[in-house]
Image: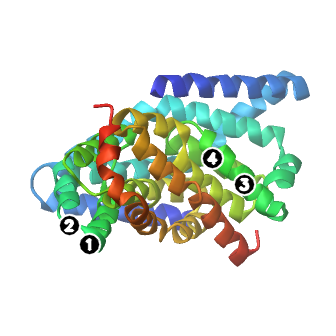
Amino acid sequence: MRDRTTLFLIGVALALAGLAWWQGGPALVVAGLVDGGKTLLGVVPLLVAAFAIAGLIQTLVTRDLVTRWLGAGTGWRGIALACLGGALIPGGPYVYYPITAALLQAGAGLGVLVAFVTAKNLWSLSRLPLEMAILGPRLTLIRFGATLLLPPLLGLLAELLFGRFSERIREAMPI
Amino acid sequence: MIVATITLIALAAALWLYAWRRNDGSHRRGLQQGWQTLRRTMPLLLVAFAIVGYINVLSPQELVQAWLGPKSGWTGILLAEGVGLLLPGGPYVVFPLIAVLYQSGAGLGPTVTLVTSWATLALISVSFELSFMGWRFSAVRWGLGVLAPLTAGGVVHLLFGG
């Protein structure tokens, strides 16, 4: 997936370079690269710190810890724990979806799993430093505040509306 | 930017100290892990920042302000949700792109919608979700989540006026 993303982005970059050439000739093509390079250099200290934080969280919070956490409660308590687990677990979709799938297989509630995935997507503690580094503290805090209630809320809604279909949802799993 | 740098360095130092005090080598492993991730994502970062540079020199301010600016209101928020779904790749690619849109004049509401939509609904991660969780789980989560970016951006729009 990473390769396809890279190729797609290279395509976008080339298209934009073409557009720059068309608008301002080779000078603008170079200017674009210089501008991008300067912006990147400006955020290097932040990026290094952000990646160090992500790496440290990744070693400190293990898969087992999160799995145990998610299996520990039901109802309100389960959803609260799921939100915390989602906030703490590092890594991309290839890390958290296998865990979510195993838990669904093992009989975890729908609300707990929806809360977990949504918290991972919106509260992720290993991603926040990067967001702060690139988008700035103000925008990050506003974004975080605006989405703070969504993980428990969506978990509860999923449980209330679709909780009784858990068995059928499990049947639709590919593995 | 200075505040962000200091906060992040302090946070990294605190985590490192905590890991070091555990005495199991996790302080070293953590940094190695971070370094490896950084190295692996370096090509993507370079391409992402080249895109950022081109968007900057092509200065699409008028275009961005018209479609996603503070005055674009709910249309801008809806459009931001659509764009967010399509954004490819991880945070190190997406955040620079969103930052450049914000600097080109996108409003606060649409920007929050953009981040939220990418984070919760991005089609590229849904393709992962489908292959692990099956279509019924994805349908429930996505169906409920579709309102999340609109709500988040809408609240910000109402509170901060754009």
User: What colouring does the structure picture have?
Assistant: rainbow
Q: x, y percentage for residue B111?
A: 67, 57
User: Do the CB atoms of the residues marked 3 and 4 lie less than 8 Å apart?
Assistant: no
User: Do the CB atoms of the residues marked 2 and 1 lie less than 8 Å apart?
Assistant: yes
Q: Residues within 10 Å of mark 3 (few under 14, many from 20)?
A: many
Report whether A68 appears left or right of A78: left
Q: Earlier in the sequence, mark 3 or mark 4?
A: 3
Measure the alpha-carbon separation of dots 3 and 1: 34 Å
Report whether B156 appears left or right of B130: right
The residue depicted at 35 percent of the width and 50 percent of the height is: A54
- The residue at which mark 3 appears reads as B78
User: Do the CB atoms of the residues marked 3 and 1 lie less than 8 Å apart?
Assistant: no
- The residue at which mark 4 appears reads as B84
Kindly identify the amino acid type of the residue bearing the numbered disc 1. Answer: Arg
Q: Chain of mark 1?
A: A
- The answer to whether B41 is drawn above or below residue A63 in the figure is above
Within the image, what quadrant is residue A88 found in? Answer: bottom left
- The residue at which mark 1 appears reads as A77
Q: Residues within 10 Å of mark 2 (few under 14, many from 20)?
A: some
What element does badge 2 sit on? loop
Q: Nearer the observer, disc 2 or disc 4?
A: 2
Labels 2 and 1 within one chain: yes
Measure the alpha-carbon separation of dots 4 and 1: 32 Å
